[in-house]
Image: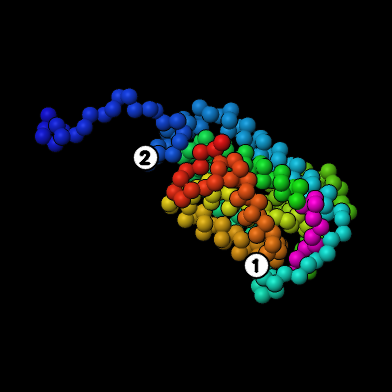
Amino acid sequence: MTAAQAREPAADASAPAPTGRHRSGFSVRQAASAVRAQWREVAGALAFRYAAYGVMTALALWAEGRPAPTLPDRVLEHLPYLAVADRLNYLAWLAVYLPLAAALLLTDVRRWVRYMVTGAYVSLVRGLTIALTGLGAPDPAHAGLGAGSGDFGAAFLELMSPLGVFQRGAIAAHLTKDLFFSGHAATTFLLLLYLRDRPFLRLVALAGHLAVVASVLLAHIHYAIDVVGAWAVTFCLYALREGWPSPGAAPEGR
């Protein structure tokens, strides 16, 4: 044994095995093992999130059949409509959402499950607020036709399909009054809250969230109050689930 080896502390044989929670060292093999070990919780959270999205979508489609006025917006009045932001809006959201959600899953499975459940609650509340409000498209000249006079079932099935949403533009075609509050802002803000104790991921999530908020405003698909409402509702639901956030403390759930 060399002198350097003699100075090294012995490994602690009683150290706990990885359980899917965030650690300083990251191993793809350990991350995959943690996901497999908790596959029931992961599958259940995904199913609940998808079901909540279905309820929200049904309520949004129902709201399309009601007349709703376009309201003045002091922010949008000063922002030009950018066709490229409108065209790439959902792809931009996907580019922000998927990598960050995957990073959370691979580094802390339990927190990811809580995040997905909280996201489902956000979807349910969003569906309720859409049904309770009657806001018309902020920029009717650039809005889709909406599904008010179309086939509810066909529109619902297309909106429940990732292919329909991201490749065929089903949301832009069928939904024009799903406004309060912004789902783009809510989902990316919720990711930011669940990643707030990870310095690098927090910065990426913040930059992505701000980019998504800018895109929905420059595309004129949301009022400014829709973004503010997303912040308020999402933060309240997060605090109810995880407790009031303290600087630097990780969300642990209740």
Q: Position of residue 126 (x, y in %)?
A: 72, 49
In the picture shown, does residue 22 fall above or below 61?
A: above
Could you tell me if residue 232 is visible in this image?
yes
Name the image quarter holding the C terminus: top right
Q: Residue 121, how many percent across, how many down?
A: 67, 42
Can residue 86 be seen in the rendering of this structure? no
Kind of residue at badge 1: Leu
Q: From this view, report whether residue 67 is shown above or below residue 139.
A: above
Q: Distance of mark 2 from mark 1, alpha carbons?
A: 40 Å
Mark 2 lies on a secondary structure that is loop
Instruction: Name the residue located 66 percent from the left edge and 35 percent from the top edge.
Output: 47
Q: Which residues are magenta?
A: 130-139
Residue that label 1 marks: 218
Q: Write the residue at 51% across / 38% down.
A: 252
Residue 9 located within the stretch drawn in magenta: no
- Local crowd at mark 2 within 10 Å, few (<14), some, or many (≥20)? few
Residue 25 shows which numbered tag?
2
Residue nearer the viewer, 12 or 234: 234
Label 1 element class: helix
Residue found at x 71% / y 40%? 52
Q: Which amino acid, by three-letter code, is at mark 2?
A: Gly
The colour scheme is rainbow
Q: Would you call the spot at circle 1 few (<14 residues within 10 Å), some (14-19), or many (20 or more)?
A: many
Point out the tag, 2 or 1, that comes first from the N-terminus: 2
Contact (Cβ within 8 Å) of mark 2 with mark 1: no
Identify the residue shown where x is 78% and y is 58%.
Answer: 176
Say which quarter of the image contains residue 87: bottom right
Residue 227's spot in the image, x, y percent?
65, 59
What is the magenta segment's predominant secondary structure? loop
Q: Residue furthest bottom?
A: 78
Q: Position of residue 192 (x, y in %)?
A: 53, 51
Residue 36 shows which numbered tag?
A: none
